[in-house]
Image (tube, rainbow, N blue to C red):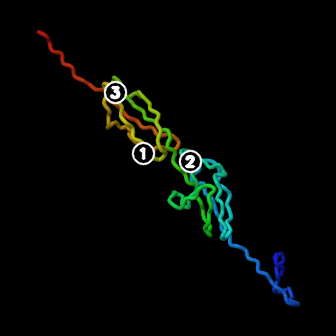
Amino acid sequence: EESECLYRWNFEKDVVVSDMTLYAKWTAYTYMVTYHANGATGGLPPADQEKIHDVDLVLWGNTGILVREGYTFSGWNTLANGSGTDYAAGSSYAADASVMLYTKWTPNSDTEYTVEHYRQDVSGNEYTKYETENKTGTTGSIAVATAKSYPGFTMNTSHGSIVANGTIAADGTLVLKLYYDRETFTVIFAENE
């Protein structure tokens, strides 16, 4: 009954005693924007946000300091696998709909892994670690060990413990192993007459 809409007209109790103007008070629809950690190994997702109809909402950044070993925070996505719509931290959300935003993770390109090279002992029964290479690659990608050239040795491609390739683990625990057999030669001594 007043333009500030501080008092609500009660159609069952309030009485019209003279001409009057009633004002409509509209409440805009609201929508929830919810954040999901999506595999984070530390931190917390941001608090939910409420978006008002027809008003753009500025999305949270990484306010809960989300971390994931082997990955870097790179914004938000509408699908957990990252194949949906991307939203940068601090960007605007304009859709008039509720949405779940998943943390988008980019694999680090400097994740550590190890390549160990084992050479056959003189006895021919055992192998001893001869050299270790510390390498880096992209988390989740396939690393392939490169054989070394050691004089007097050839790579044993059928050794039961060989690990020639593997997926680079986010925590740097991938260990590739190559084995080398001693080259053997037969020496024949001829009697000199």
* Amino acid on which the number 3 mark rests in the picture: Tyr
| Disc marking residue 150 | 3
- Other residues around mark 3 within 10 Å, as few (<14) / some (14–19) / many (≥20): few
Looking at the image, which residue sits at the far left? 193
| Disc marking residue 34 | none
Q: Are marks 2 and 3 in contact (CB under 8 Å)?
A: no
Q: Let me know if residue 161 appears in the view.
A: no
Q: Residue at x 40, y 27 (%)?
A: 128
Looking at the image, which residue sits at the far top? 193
Camera-side residue of 168 and 24: 24
* Amino acid on which the number 1 mark rests in the picture: Ile
Q: Is residue 184 left or right of residue 164?
A: left
Q: Is residue 143 left or right of residue 159?
A: right
Q: Which residue is mark 2?
A: 72
CA gap between label 1 and label 3 equals 25 Å
First in residue order: circle 1 vs circle 3: 1
Looking at the image, which residue sits at the far right? 17
Dividing the image into 4 quarters, which one contains the N terminus? bottom right
* Amino acid on which the number 2 mark rests in the picture: Thr
| Disc marking residue 142 | 1
